[in-house]
Amino acid sequence: MDPELLKRITARRAELDELEKQLAKELADVRAERDELAVAERVLERVSEQLADERASARPAPGQVGGRAVMLIPHRAPDVEEAMLPPDYQRILAAVRQAAGPVMARQVGDALRIDISVRSKLEPLRGKLVRLADRGWLRKLPDGRFTTRL
């Protein structure tokens, strides 16, 4: 047998043995990472379910009118139109929209011709503005002013 050929075969076998070790290590690393991803996926699913449950329980329960569940001021959603709001809330939204920028409750009261000098008339309006902000129809700024959502 040719000694040079035998030397080349032995060298190639050594290269393949080394390659096999590298591939076995990479395969083990891939399997370990897949296992970690499977665990992460299960954790993400559980957290998502918990958040969905928390969000559902955080929403105010609708009232009952005529035996049917209703929410006078629904949360803003793609399938909920502004026309579903009571008329006075629609007027409030229109007044905020027509303003040049963020407005205080007093400015909305002026636009709606409410006697803002009487606190008992201004506070219910402020409550409605806050309710609209809580339900996603308006945005309440940290300084207490209200603006429309984009």
Image (spheres, rainbow, N blue to C red):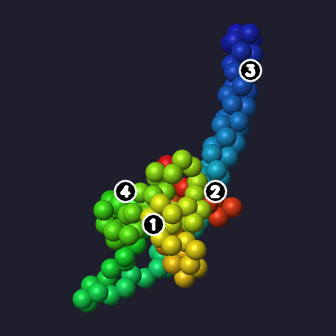
Residue type highlighted by circle 3? Ala
Residue on which disc 4 sits: 78
Of residues 51 and 91, the one nearer the viewer is: 91
Residue on which disc 1 sits: 113
Rendered image: mark on residue 11: 3
Of marks 3 and 1, which one's residue comes earlier in the chain?
3
Of residues 107 and 29, the one nearer the viewer is: 107
- Res 127 visible: no
Q: Quadrant of the N terminus?
A: top right
Q: Nearer the viewer, mark 3 or mark 1?
A: 1
Residue on which disc 2 sits: 36
* C-alpha distance separating marks 3 and 4: 68 Å
98 sits to left or right of 41: left
- Residue positioned 33% across, 60% down in the render: 81
Quarter where residue 38 is shown: bottom right
Residue type highlighted by circle 4? Pro
Residue type highlighted by circle 1? Arg
Of marks 2 and 4, which one's residue comes earlier in the chain?
2
Task: Tell me: residue 47, above or below residue 103.
Answer: below
Quarter where residue 122 is shown: bottom right
Q: Position of residue 36 (x, y in %)?
A: 63, 56
Report crowding for label 2: few under 14, some 14 to 19, many 20 or more residues within 10 A (C-alpha): few
